[in-house]
Amino acid sequence: EREKEREKRRESKRENNMAGNNYDEGYEAYGERQGEPGQPEGSDAVQAGENKPRILLMGLKKSGKSSIQKVVFHKMSPNETLFLESTSKLVKSDISNNSFVQFHIWDFPGQLNVFDSTFDAESIFGGCGALIFVIDAQDAFDEALESLKVTLKNASKINRHINFEVFVHKADGLSDDNKLQAMNRIRNKALDDSKALEADGIRISFHTTSIYDHSIFEAFSKVIQKLVPQLPTLENLLDNLVSSCRIEKAFLIDVVSKIYIATDSAPVDMQTYELCSDMIDIVIDVSCIYGMKDGDQGLAYDVNSHSVIRLKNDTVLYLHEVNKYLALVAVIRGRNFSKHGLIEYNVGCFRNAIGQIFNIASKE
């Protein structure tokens, strides 16, 4: 019966996500609109989102742009993306998970030339915070590299402050050698093209991604972090927490998208991030079974969400609710977890500091 109840809740949550519905009162629904680029979305929408940064998803047709958005922000299963139709119109999505994760995503169809005179390129790129260019690593990418060159040239003329993010996507189907070879070729060509443009200050980052593992979430995390003005403060708070509690690694993770808003200054290891991300799913799934009453709706995550998991290698996974949007997930060595009372106290101070930053960000 417990297993049936668990499957029932999962199915209900998946259907809600597929339909674009909001399944938690604490989160705004992912509003998805379709229209032509350069045209107004309506005065209400503009006023509500005028201060939100804009992320553009661009690339050739069938490079995987829509699949990325569906998997990361709409919790679609990677296998279900195989049945997605090709994007024929510009799709605008409003992502408003919390005060730190608020932005618009514009998903452009691959066949659309946004630099054509019929479109208003100024309005498209003028308020753009990041431009993600997706390249299919399993396909011949000469045409994609040429399209990237044109995009770099024209977009940088309009907005010098755009962060260009190149996703070398669908890397799961490549061997490690071919993956590295594809990344080096794309990186070298893109950097050479940017130098040839004689445009100083163009910022280009490269990420190897796949929707079948956590690489796409890590890449999107790094993109989002560049758009969070409070990032230095958040990182400093995490560094202080890690130092005072002898924590190996700590993440501040958005519980819906699994994007980490900030982490401490230690290098990010993919396996560590996967463990922390999976822990959120475990806590929410167990809470759905044992922590929710019949008829309760919404995400099984609240102020009481707190969990400790001890692994066989004497590593402790620690999760604590920060607010209804964010979770602190940390990796601690077993011998350093003996003074867990002190850890709880320090985490409480950390939560209070995050709450103050959160309130300031909400007012802004």
Image (cartoon, grey):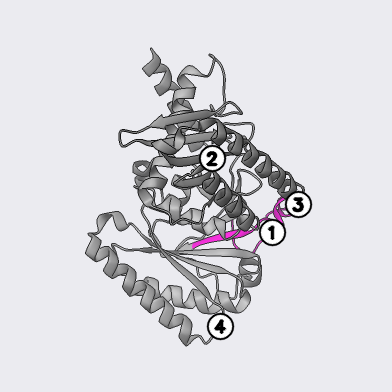
Per the model, the C-alpha gap separating discs 1 and 3 is: 24 Å
Per the model, the C-alpha gap separating discs 3 and 4 is: 32 Å
Per the model, the C-alpha gap separating discs 2 and 4 is: 38 Å
- Residue at the disc numbered 1: 40
- Residue at the disc numbered 2: 328
Q: Give the side of residue 191 with respect to residue 203, left or right.
A: left
Span of residues in magenta? 33-57
| Residue 39 pos. (x, y %) | 66, 61
- The residue at 46%/55% (across/down) is 266
In contact (CB < 8 Å): disc 1 and disc 3: no
Label located before the other in sequence (3 or 2): 2
Could you say whether the residue bearing mark 2 is in a helix, strand or loop?
Answer: strand
In contact (CB < 8 Å): disc 1 and disc 2: no
Q: Is residue 237 above or below residue 128?
A: above
Residue 341 is drawn in which quadrant? top right
| Residue 184 pos. (x, y %) | 32, 72
- The residue at 60%/54% (across/down) is 236
Residue 303 is drawn in which quadrant? top right
- Residue at the disc numbered 4: 200
Q: What amino acid is labelled 3 in the image?
A: Glu
Q: What amino acid is labelled 2 in the image?
A: Leu
Label located before the other in sequence (1 or 2): 1
Q: Is residue 160 above or below residue 349?
A: below
Label located before the other in sequence (2 or 4): 4
